[in-house]
Image (cartoon, rainbow, N blue to C red):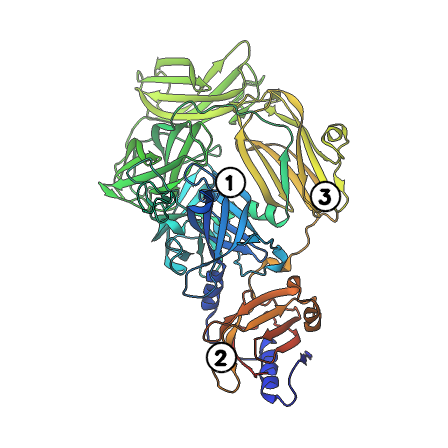
Amino acid sequence: MQRFKLTNFPHGNRLCFLIMLGLSVLLIGAPLERTFAQSAADLTRIQQATVFIMQTETVLGEPVIRCVGSGTVVSRDGLILTNAHNTLPNRNCPGTSLIIALNVRQGEPPVPTYRAEILQADAGLDLALLRITQQTDGRLVSGAELALPFVELADSTTLQLDETISIIGYPDLGDTAVSIERGTISGFAAEPSGGDQSWIKTSISVPGVMTGGGAYDSNGRLIGVPTTAPIVGLSPDARCVRFQDTNRDGALNAADICVPIGGAINVLRPIDFARPLLRAAALDLTLTAITQQAETRAISGDPSLSRLFFSPTVNEAQMPTSVVRTLPTGTESVYLFFNYDNMTPQTVYELRVTVNGVPNTTFSLSPVRWSGGVNGIWYVGSSGQTWANGIYDFTVFIDGSATESARLIIGQPTGDTPVFSDLIFGIDDFQGAVNNGFVLPSGNTVSGRFIYRNMAPGMGWTAIWYYEGNEVVRDSQAWSDEASGTKLVRIQDPNGLLPGSYRLELYIDDRLSATSDFIIAGSQVGGFARIFTDAHFTTASSEAEAVRAAAISSFSGGTESIYALFQWERIAPGTLWTMRWSVDGDVFYSQTRPWGAAENGENFLVRLSTPDGVPDGTYRMELYIGQILFAFTEARVGIGQLPIDRFAQAGGTQLSGTIYDAETGDGIPGVTFFVISELYSVSDFNESWDGEQVYATAITDNDGRFQIDRPLLPGLPYSMFIVAQGYLPISADGVEVDADTPDLDIPIYLTRG
């Protein structure tokens, strides 16, 4: 039987004793009529975890707001997930300080409370993770003392069309309370950055200042971040607000700083994109590339897009399977491909789609930050939902200005149209066979194999090969093969094909019918490429020693730094490659960038470190070119498994209620309710008033209402301490809930002291 220790009660105060005893019984799972449904408790917690973010800079000695947005607290120690475009300094948001305003009172505007710093960010994905570090007056804040309400993450890969969701954030410049918009998932947008669910489309249209807030499923879990990138001063679509006399001339006019607010938002970045940032931050992991890479491609002009075309599907190399202008009734996937050049993570791009002349938001993409490289091939598309018959016009915008357009007709029979499709590449081995792939080793010959259908003798067709964007071979002929089958075309160089990026375009009667890019890198081993070798971990007291140190696969717990090294060969500058790190199977770092080191080399050096030693776990580094894994290494630290963090979950029993004056029956405002962690008792807390001992808190509103800012987890013996000026405190040790305990809404009475 659970025992409860009740202290600090006045003699004879039977009422207080009974109330606290009732609280204790309720908390161990006794039946109780629930005042609020689970969704209401979740909603309150989510609102409390939603913050308003102001990026500021100092102008004429005073802080001036440069950008605003919403954010979500995702851990009790003050980690905040938001967008990168309104927090990272950039051309539209050049501020260097971040002010965090909290939802202190329900139904009221947020209150500036803390300062934060950027802990992790990915400008291309437009996600940033902030950490609260100071109060607004500059006093330092320890994360262990915060105990903030936070939200749990969903698995965004399981989301379905028409699923009901809620978007929560601040709808203006911080003048009103947090807002809730409800709707459904209307579709998904595909990009090379994340496959078929790179973006979540919604039926909800929310204000641009809610960018960086949160979108939630019916269980109150975070599924995505609403995102739009404002365009300032670059197009008629620019939206900004002037509300500060920033130049101190006594007037609010065009000479003052304009805060970008963007347009309406209807897309979300799925929460799974943020998991690596959160994992790295939770473990305080820092990855530093010791081997520096130079910028391989300078921006040589304005951003541009060209060569728009459509494909019904995308292959494993994220290349088009064919090029089409029409598709049949019942089409469920469409991908718009285009070339891009001079793009940066600050470039804003947008896709607008009309159907029979009417704007279609389901297949359009709101203005978002660019997540590709400087130049290459890209796509945006949709799969898994039916495209109605009609004439579709696609227009791509850069920084608010229209660039190129393309038209697709859906509902026309494809008939006997000649087609080339399914283009793949390989090298010829000694038996004359082709080894399929899109990353090939250096050699003298590369073959492209494709499927052809509905061809007729004498038709004109052309194969054009490119190297690093420049045409190198063109071969035009009259068709002399069968009507359908497979065919090989080759590019050869007796001196050896140079490593780098290649492209093949196939035309039928001057109409592009198939195209694909591929990479040549590394040396040939059998039919495959050897690019990265001797990948291994080690530890050393310096970078110079790490290069000479022996490979290690098992490290002692608390190792200060771990080094990863590898060798490489025949990688052309500008070749896109990916380094990915994980611990216990969870990715905490993944970056794709152009290769900027020498073409051949050894001892590419990367350091993994944390202030208190690398946490126990199994660490893995993987090296990719394209979608192909070419090398990896793995090592154990300590016991080889991360410790379980009980505080990483927001689920459990939600405790709320009203605190009354025992004599008058009136609600008491300003009462503080402390929930003390299972490691400490009320007497421990009374001796030190140490914030690190506090698991959760609440302060009553003007009516005496409260809600504990974190749910109680089952099986942990909490202590409770309720204190208010002019009243006798109430306390209890050893209060537990179990997995079946419902959310609680209870009355509590205090006696004047």
Label 2 element class = loop
Q: Are marks 3 and 2 in contact (CB under 8 Å)?
A: no
Q: Position of residue 345 (x, y in %)?
A: 45, 35
Q: Is residue 641 positioned above or below 22 on the image?
A: above
Question: Which residue reaches farthest front?
Answer: 249
Question: Which residue reaches farthest left?
Answer: 357
Residue at image point 49% right, 79% down: 33
Q: Are marks 3 and 1 in contact (CB under 8 Å)?
A: no
Residue assigned mark 1:
122
Q: Nearer the viewer, residue 647 or 114?
A: 114
Label 3 element class = strand
Label 1 element class = strand
N-term-proximal mark, 3 vs 2: 2
Q: Which mark is residue 33?
A: 2
Amino acid at pointer 2? Glu
Residue at mark 3 to residue at mark 2: CA–CA distance: 50 Å
**Crowd rating for badge 3 (residues with CA inside 10 Å; few <14, some 14–19, many 20+):** many
Q: Quadrant of the N terminus?
A: bottom right
Residue at mark 1 to residue at mark 2: CA–CA distance: 46 Å
Amino acid at pointer 1? Asp
Amino acid at pointer 3? Arg
Residue assigned mark 3:
636
**Crowd rating for badge 1 (residues with CA inside 10 Å; few <14, some 14–19, many 20+):** some
